[in-house]
Amino acid sequence: MNGNYQDWAKETAKKIAEKMEWVSEKSKDKIPYTTVNGTHDNRLDPKIEFTPDNGPRWWCNGFWAGMMWLMYHETGNERYREIGEYTEKSLDSCFDYFYGLHHDVGFMWLPSAVADYRLTGSEDGKRRGLHAAALLAGRFNPVGRFIRAWNDPIVEAGKEAQALDNRGWAIIDCLMNIPLLYWASDMTKDPRFKQIAMLHADRAMECFVRPDGSVRHIVEFDPFTGVMVRDYGGQGYGDGSSWTRGQAWGLYGFVISYIHTGKQEYLDTAKKIAHYFMANIPESGLIPVDFRQPKKPAWEDSTAAAIAASGLLEISRQVGEYERDLYLNAAIKLLKTLEEKRCSWGRENDCILEKCTAAYHDKEHEFNIIYGDYYFMEAVFKLKGDDVFLW
Ligand code: GLY
């Protein structure tokens, strides 16, 4: 099945490069999240409100820069470096007024500032990455051994009594943020960042991963005693369900923790989640929003497919040759399906991946989402044989 996969990856990388050549110029002053009538939106638009969900602090704001750094690595074209640097600088306002920054500082500054440092040695990139790492480390709950996900919700006056208390909430996605802490320990030679990352990853192994290999999205701990209280379905279908992007964050996140620490249990856990994910890939190769959602409506999430593919490729690089093809073949199936059925290569759309979904119960489903494009690009470049690794 995977005999000609490198030729396929080269061909697809060429299509990505052709598309990025014009899209990068068209969107060079933006930080896109999605599209409006096929055109990238802009999270830097001064007209939009400065909230965690919208303006510069939006958790997805590192992926456009990440795409520029992947393209820079791929082509050596300085234009991608300039656009990547512009995006990175544009996020500095988040540090000036850091209220509302969240655990997703890893998603924001690893593919932007830290990628810049890794690829060019930029001192500004290093400073920004370390600033973000200090904010992430500051969210650690030492009694519960977890990193708090979000902040106190903004509550309307008079409705304080009904406000949600999320001080003890941690989410599976955070496994993709903690690589910022591994990197910070490498930079500073101070083990504290890595210690926090490993305590969080250990607690996630204990409390998020179910015996069948599926993972919970949100786990609530008592923030004072650290005891696990309950879990929530979060962005998936419901309590006890299996949000596919969460499964993808889990399998990718644990293999990254293995790469940075060498701790065997992390690789074993990544494999366990991967086996569950692979066993649930439908015949079509198209990934639903939740593996346990009702048959109708059959909402899809192409981002889950792209993230899982990139994570499976990372696992395939870490295991012995007898196991390698299992993960490689699954990644190839996901990527080829996306390319055949869910990619837009023309000028009618600034994004590549179609049918991405942020959350099962949101009003909107199946639209363009920037991190779908980022992980698809990352996975295709890896499959082609690039040594790229921004996490
Ligand atoms: N990190 C939030 C999400 O995956 O939607």
Image (spheres, rainbow, N blue to C red):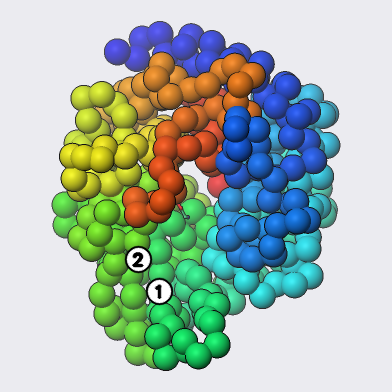
How many residues crowd mark 2 within 10 Å: few (<14), some (14–19), many (20+)? many
The answer, for residue 360, to whether it is visible in the render is: yes
| Residue 145 found in image quarter | bottom left
Ligand 1 near label 2 (Cβ, under 8 Å)?
A: no
Tell me the element at label 2. Answer: strand
Does the image show residue 85?
A: no
Quadrant of the image containing the N terminus: top left
Disc marking residue 210: none
Report if the CB atoms under discs 2 and 1 are less than 8 Å apart.
yes
- Tell whether circle 1 marks a residue whose Cβ is less than 8 angstroms from ligand 1: no
Vertical side of 264 occupied by 142: above or below: below
Point out which mark residue 169 bears.
Answer: 1
Q: Residues within 10 Å of mark 1 (few under 14, many from 20)?
A: many
> Where is residue 142 drawn, in percent x and y?
46, 82
- Residue type indicated by callout 2: Ile
- Where, by quadrant of the figure, is residue 226 drawn? bottom left
- Relative vertical location of residue 182 with respect to residue 309 in this rendering, above or below: below
- Residue 133 located left or right of residue 215: right
Q: As shown in the figure, which amino acid type bears the numbered disc 1?
A: Trp
